[in-house]
Image (cartoon, grey):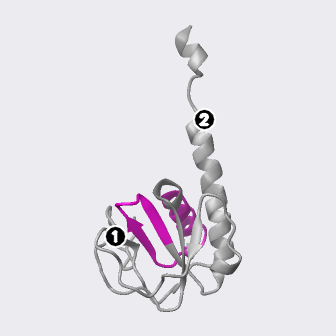
């Protein structure tokens, strides 16, 4: 993973700075979220701050205020708790930075869809159970 300075990190950073004020938060399962982060970084490096919640095994993408009003992506939820300090069991996977304050909801929606399809395909790869029995 690349940190905002360009250096490589393998773990979320424990920076506990407050998230940008006035934003909404899209929460997804960690596996789908990690795939989406990779897709966003590979496509245009257009990913805003992302929190990793180890207790809930989820990722939270910061998005513009008002996103929760129309968010309807299956397997995710969008809420308005943004602006508070992260909980003790969370760490910044992508820390707040000045380049991209929040992730564009349309871009995130597309990345989450692509991530879900990728994971579905990956989970389906391998020998059929019938082949293993026979």
Q: Residue at x 31, y 63 (%)?
A: 11
Give how far across and how far down residue 68 sits, in percent: 63, 78
The image shows residue 51 at horizontal and vertical percentages of 42, 72
SS for tag 2? helix
Please tell me whether residue 47 belongs to the stretch shown in magenta. yes
| Residue 86 pos. (x, y %) | 35, 78
The magenta region covers 34-60
Instruction: Identify which residue is drawn at 46% across, 58% down.
Output: 30
Q: Can residue 108 be found in the magenta stretch?
A: no
Which corner quadrant of the image does residue 123 belong to? top right
Left or right of residue 14: residue 25: right
User: In the image as oriented, which residue stretches furthest toward the top?
Assistant: 134
For the point 58% across and 67% down, which residue is it?
77
Q: Is residue 108 above or below residue 116?
A: below
Give how far apart the Cα atoms at labels 2 and 1 are.
31 Å
Residue annotated with mark 1: 90
Is 57 positioned to the left or the right of 42 in the image? left
Which residue is label 2 attached to? 124
Where residue 96 appears, x then y in whole percent? 42, 83
Label 1's element?
Answer: strand
């Amino acid at each position: 993973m690349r940190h905002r300075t360009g250096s490589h990190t393998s773990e979320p950073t424990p920076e506990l700075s407050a998230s940008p004020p006035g934003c909404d938060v899209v929460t997804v399962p960690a596996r789908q979220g990690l795939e989406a982060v990779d897709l966003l970084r590979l496509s245009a490096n257009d990913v805003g701050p992302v929190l990793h919640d180890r207790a809930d095994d989820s990722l939270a993408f910061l998005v513009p205020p008002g996103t929760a009003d129309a968010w309807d992506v299956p397997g995710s939820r969008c809420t308005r708790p943004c602006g508070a300090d992260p909980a003790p069991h969370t760490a910044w996977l992508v820390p707040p930075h000045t380049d991209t304050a929040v992730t564009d909801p349309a871009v995130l929606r597309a990345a989450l869809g692509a991530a879900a399809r990728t994971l579905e395909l990956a989970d389906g790869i391998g020998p059929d159970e019938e082949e293993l029995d026979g």
